[in-house]
């Protein structure tokens, strides 16, 4: 929210959950520091880069300790280097905090890079392909999975025409 500082943005979910103000501030400061934003707590979104704003969003999401994180193309507006760094950090945080994330993306490489499981959906809400991104898939089978995803997606495009 553009009228709230980074700290106030991260604390928002905690405030909605009726967490005591001092505790909400402590948790929000901790998450900002963890995401490399210590010293930017009082900055407004317009003063932050796109990557920094996305880090604030990630901090806000994790601060409320959700069981499940729903992410709809969270890095699509970022440059590729910033997006790459944030994807790696996001995966690390999900694993460190033992969370589950559903990550929606139109980027095949992004899905394969961060996902333990990749699903390709066709309309209406039908799973057309599923791949487990285990050690075998990450090593030698990656190209075969990517080729299969492209075939499945092209079938959907043909059906839609």
Image: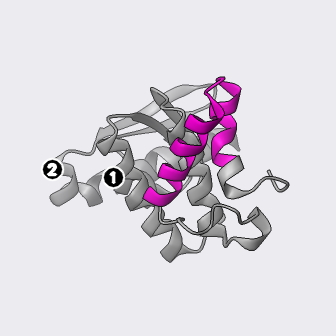
Q: Is residue 157 above or below residue 40?
A: above
Q: Looking at the image, can residue 60 be seen?
A: yes
Q: Is residue 19 magenta?
A: yes
Question: Which secondary structure lies at badge 2?
Answer: helix
Where residue 107 appears, x then y in whole percent? 51, 57
Please state which of residues 19 and 152 is positioned toward the viewer in this rendering.
19
Residue 85 figure quarter: bottom left
Q: Which residue is mark 2?
A: 135
Please state which of residues 41 and 122 is positioned toward the viewer in this rendering.
41
Question: Which secondary structure lies at badge 1?
Answer: helix
Magenta-colored span: 9-34
Q: Residues within 10 Å of mark 1 (few under 14, many from 20)?
A: few
- Say whether residue 95 is left or right of residue 127: left
- Say whether residue 20 is left or right of residue 116: right
- Say whether residue 3 is left or right of residue 15: right
- Say whether residue 99 is left or right of residue 158: left
Residue placed at 46% from the left, 32% from the top?
128
Residue placed at 51% from the left, 67% from the top?
83
Where residue 3 appears, x then y in whole percent? 85, 54
Q: Which residue is mark 1?
A: 92
Residue 18 figure quarter: top right
Q: Are marks 2 and 1 in contact (CB under 8 Å)?
A: no
């Amino acid at each position: 929210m553009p009228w709230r500082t980074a700290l106030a943005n991260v604390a928002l979910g905690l405030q909605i959950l009726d967490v005591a103000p001092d505790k909400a501030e402590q948790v929000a400061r901790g998450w900002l520091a963890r995401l490399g934003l210590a010293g930017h707590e009082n900055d407004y979104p317009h003063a932050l880069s796109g990557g920094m704003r996305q880090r604030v969003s990630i901090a806000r999401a994790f601060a409320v300790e959700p069981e499940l994180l729903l992410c709809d193309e969270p890095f699509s507006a970022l440059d590729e280097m910033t997006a790459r760094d944030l994807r790696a950090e996001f995966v690390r945080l999900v694993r460190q905090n033992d969370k589950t994330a559903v990550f929606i993306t139109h980027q095949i490489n992004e899905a394969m890079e961060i996902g333990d499981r990749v699903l390709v959906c066709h309309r209406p809400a039908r799973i057309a392909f599923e791949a487990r991104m285990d050690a075998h898939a990450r090593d030698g089978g990656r190209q075969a999975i990517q080729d299969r995803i492209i075939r499945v997606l092209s079938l959907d495009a043909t059906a839609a025409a």
